[in-house]
Image (tube, rainbow, N blue to C red):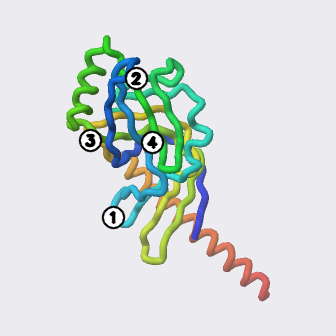
Amino acid sequence: MEVKTDRTLRQVRSCASRFTTRDDQGGPVIEGYFAVFNSDYEIWPGATEQVAPEAFNNALGGDIRALCDHDTRLVLGRTTAGTLSLKVDERGLWGSIKINEQDSDAMNLYARVQRGDVSQCSFGFDILDEEYKENPDGSCLWIIRDVFLYEVSVCTFPAYAETSVEARKNDRETQRRRALELRKNKLKERIAKWH
């Protein structure tokens, strides 16, 4: 059964990705994928989520920041400043951050990424459109189809925040209630036709 939802609640998601560093003529750069399409991200056993290839189609034109660990005090780059570049390709959402050499926090992070001490990523967003599927075995899948993107983050420990897990559990219960109501209404209609 498929049920479409439309929600706007700021979310954070993680991605298993490796960043690379380089020092080009413009200075140090951190690059990598902040989201990978069509990969199952486990929320809890039996509940997964995917980011669809079209999810960022309308999301890259805004004022998006690159942060360290989602901390708004540690801004690494910004699309409107030209220090963060984001693009979508067949694999996912790829980004390049031009590191400010005058910012000691940014340079410290660059060194940690270069050594491999920090290598994970996340992104912060609102869900504008998604699809929910519940399988016969009781497992479920959310497919995120459209987002409003606030930020991308280079992270030490990316993980689903407890609030995100709780929100998804509430979503699942809401989906089940809607499906049950739909079945009840269809049954009532069929009974009414027989009388």
Q: Which residue is mark 1?
A: 45
Near mark 1 (Cα within 10 A), the count class, few <14, some 14-19 or many ≥20, is few
Please tell me whether residue 144 is drawn above or below residue 28 in the rendered image: below
Residue extending farthest bottom: 194
**Real-space CA distance between mark 1 and mark 3, rounded to the nearest whole angstrom:** 20 Å
Residue at point 54%, 53% (across, down): 52
Q: Is residue 145 left or right of residue 22?
A: right
Which three-letter amino acid code belongs to the residue tagged 1?
A: Pro
Q: Which image quarter is the C terminus in?
A: bottom right
Query: What is the distance, in whole Å, between disc 2 and disc 4 at their CAs?
Result: 25 Å
Q: Which mark is residue 98?
A: 2
Marks 1 and 4, how far apart in space? 20 Å
Count of numbered badges drawn on the protein:
4
Identity, as a three-letter code, of the amino acid under mark 3: Phe
Name the one closer to the observer, 183 or 151: 151
Residue identifier under label 4: 11
Residues tagged 1 and 3 counted as in contact (Cβ below 8 A): no
Above or below residue 162? Residue 188 is: below
Separation (CA) of disc 3 from disc 2:
22 Å
> Residue at 52% across / 59% down in the picture?
174
Checking the image for residue 157, the label placed there is 3
- Image coordinates of residue 161 in percent, x first then y, are 34, 45
Q: Secondary structure at mark 2?
A: strand
